[in-house]
Image (cartoon, rainbow, N blue to C red):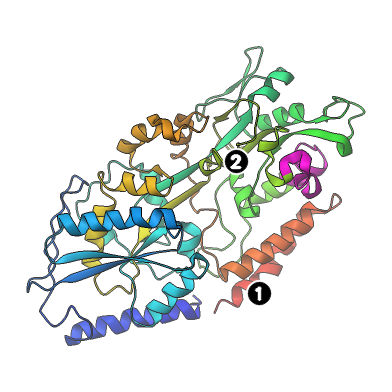
Amino acid sequence: MKVSKFRAILLLLFAMSLIAAACGGGDDADDGGDTATTAASGDGGGDTATTAAASGEAVEIRWFVGLGAGTDAPVIPQQQAIVDEFNATKPLGENISLKLDVAPDADQAATLMQTQIVGGNAPDIAGPVGVKGAAQFFGGWLDINPYLGDYDLSDFDPALVEFWNQGGVQLGLPFAVFPQVLWYNQELFDEAGLAYPPAEFGAPYVDADGNEKPWDLDTLRELAMELTVDSNGLTPNDDGFDPNARVQWGFGNMFNDFRGNATLFGSGNFVDADNETCVFPDEWKTAANWYHDAIWVDHFHPDAAFGDSEILGSGNWFNSGNMGMITIHTWYGGWGTADLAADFDVAAIPSNAAGTITAKLHADTIGIPKATSHPAEAVEVLKWMMSAEIAPRLAAIYGGLPARASAQAAYVGDPANDLGFDWNVAVSALSYPDNPNHEAWWPNYLESTDAMNEWWTELTNDPAADVDAGIDAFCGLLQPVFDRDA
């Protein structure tokens, strides 16, 4: 397997730390004897008890913030309050303290943390961090699973625990989640005489006449065709429909690259299990053709020109009131629909042709760099941060739905979190996350993403494009980019 230079440095540092530990020197924890850390209590709450070191040495755990949310001025004092509470209450004993380290520039946070790691000054805890942010340090996260002991995971959906097991490494616990749901404009459905899509995942679609059909992508397409209208009130199903005079669209997938769009058809990645060979998942081949047809044949999905136009909110399609359905995450609520006059709600994500539902997930966790000098103590602090008492408060700082099931009812019931849609649908979506995630690591991450975007933009902007030929050519374009990650 090829290993990137950055990953090689991380592995080298990790090996050096092991050698130093074996020789009895090298870091500030070694001059007073062996450390001894007890396992967390089994209730998963805040009553963990840890002995920092048998000799009574002090251990400071540094919490690095900047890979995701957390650098905005208003939230820094809220994070500091959590740190102050830890240090005042000493939940893990007198000898373990916590220090907040917020990156001064979020855009440079990953570079700063990489510099700290290479310089032998790795943070002990880092986050919140999403999948994309974590992918920048692929191979550099501690597998916390051996340290969890009897930590109670029953408050988490098992699918969410597995979500953070990436490349065989449990790099974190479920923390703050932003599920994807289908948003629909109720006014446009009413005007078309269409029944609303189902709120229950796995339930059928029941049309206005009471007839049932599977709630799948074929049914989504049928509704989208009926919701697409030109200036004469005609739909793509009507003779004389003019796609160049559309004033309303049935469906759109906003703010996504191709991996994000394709995940509606199933989870996957463009890199094989060997982490170096380009592959094109079969479900995503179907997706490429479906989206191209949706734009240029069925006309229910905007092309780039319409998508950027004022009639579709200059890119915020659903907010314009001229879009029937979109798929997007809960972080869109509030600001995204601020100017939408029509009533709206959210519904379940439809299944693919095989009956599989994939509701792609944006989520944050807090991880531990493999290069930390205090892995056992860092995991104990992490357990405290992810406890039933602390984690929901932390998630609220970043505007995320708590991943802990026991905290979700309070979040959903809080009027401050009322964003105009049924939160219960979003909570249900958490059982269907994409794994691999649509932002998962792949070789030469940024350059690979640029290459994919260029390929997909060219295909979707050409109504006569041979999509199958484009699919066949894709790995020929991407494999050399992968190969440069060596």
Q: What residue does disc 1 label? A: 480
Of callouts 2 and 1, which one flags the residue occurring earlier in the amino acid sequence? 2
Which residue position is annotated with label 2? 336
Count of number-bearing discs: 2
Q: Nearer the viewer, residue 56 or 282?
A: 56
Determine whether, in the image, residue 345 is placed left or right of residue 161.
Answer: right
Alpha-carbon span between mark 2 and mark 1: 38 Å
Q: Which stretch did the figure color magenta?
A: 291-313
> In this view of the protein, which residue sits in the foreground, 408 or 97?
97
Which SS class for mark 2?
A: loop
Q: In this view, does 58 lie to the left or right of 153?
A: left
Is residue 305 one of those drawn in magenta?
yes
Q: Which amino acid does label 1 sit on?
A: Pro
Q: Please determine whether, in this image, residue 211 is positioned above or below residue 365.
A: above
* Dominant secondary structure of the residues highlighted in magenta in the image: helix
Query: Residue 65's spot in the image, x, y percent?
Result: 39, 63
| Relative image position of residue 458 (x, y in whole percent) | 78, 58
